[in-house]
Image (cartoon, rainbow, N blue to C red):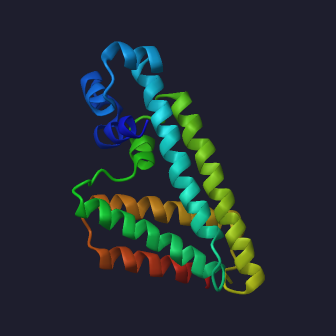
Amino acid sequence: MEAACRVFWAKGYEGATTEDLCEATGLGRSSVYNTFKSKSHLFRRSLDYYVHMMTARQIAVLGEDGPNALERVRGLLAVVIDGEMESRRKGHGSGCFTVNTITSLASKDPLVAKIIDTDLERRLFSLRSVIKSGRLDGSITSPRDAQSLAWYLVSVIYGMRVAAQSGVDRQILDDIATTSLDALTT
């Protein structure tokens, strides 16, 4: 699944060929189709694998012990930046599989859209929870409601990933993160 995910992540649904998938997974054409039924089914399974992995990572970072909730959000933004810089260093400037899918396929495939929507709800829930925690510990003081702030952070993270994919340097991403944190306290 991980190998197929990497192919779809790098090439997108349309760009990934059956040959690419066979080469990456080590499976023959008939094995790929016997196991996964179709390219679209394999794509959805790969996307589901990716979003569970990435969202679990977000939830783990936001759930870590830290001085306060704002610092946990800071940690999440740092993980995003570090991940983007590491991908670039390794020559994998593919951006975020989720963002790529949202912009290229989600509006055309209701099953893909459902995976994206379910994942988004999990992300928003974890962000709302940490924002509410920040209200209790005094580290998040913005008067905006938790849902709006959670949406804001999701949008910032997606935007940071797109900006990184376009080649901006780390300092710009750090500045975006700092500005985002400021928005949580004003």
Residue at left offset 58%, top offset 55%: 56
**Image position of 108 with respect to 30: above or below:** below
- On the image, which quarter does residue 88 sit in? bottom left
**Image position of 21 with respect to 137: above or below:** above
Q: Is residue 129 left or right of residue 62?
A: right
Q: Is residue 92 left or right of residue 184?
A: left
Residue at left offset 38%, top offset 69%: 82
Residue occupying the far right of the picture: 136
| Nearer the observer, 175 or 56 | 56
- On the image, which quarter does residue 9 sit in? top left
**Image position of 14 with respect to 143: above or below:** above
Residue at left offset 44%, top offset 27%: 42
| Nearer the observer, 24 or 166 | 24
Residue 26 is situated, as x and y percent measured from the top left of the image, at 31, 28
Residue 95 is situated, as x and y percent measured from the top left of the image, at 34, 53
| Nearer the observer, 168 or 4 | 4
Residue occupying the far left of the picture: 91
Residue 40 is situated, as x and y percent measured from the top left of the image, at 43, 24
Residue at left offset 31%, top offset 79%: 171
Confirm whether residue 107 shows in the render: no
Confirm whether residue 120 shows in the render: yes
Residue 181 is situated, as x and y percent measured from the top left of the image, at 53, 80
Q: Number of callouts in the render?
A: 0
Which part of the image, by quadrant, shows the C terminus? bottom right
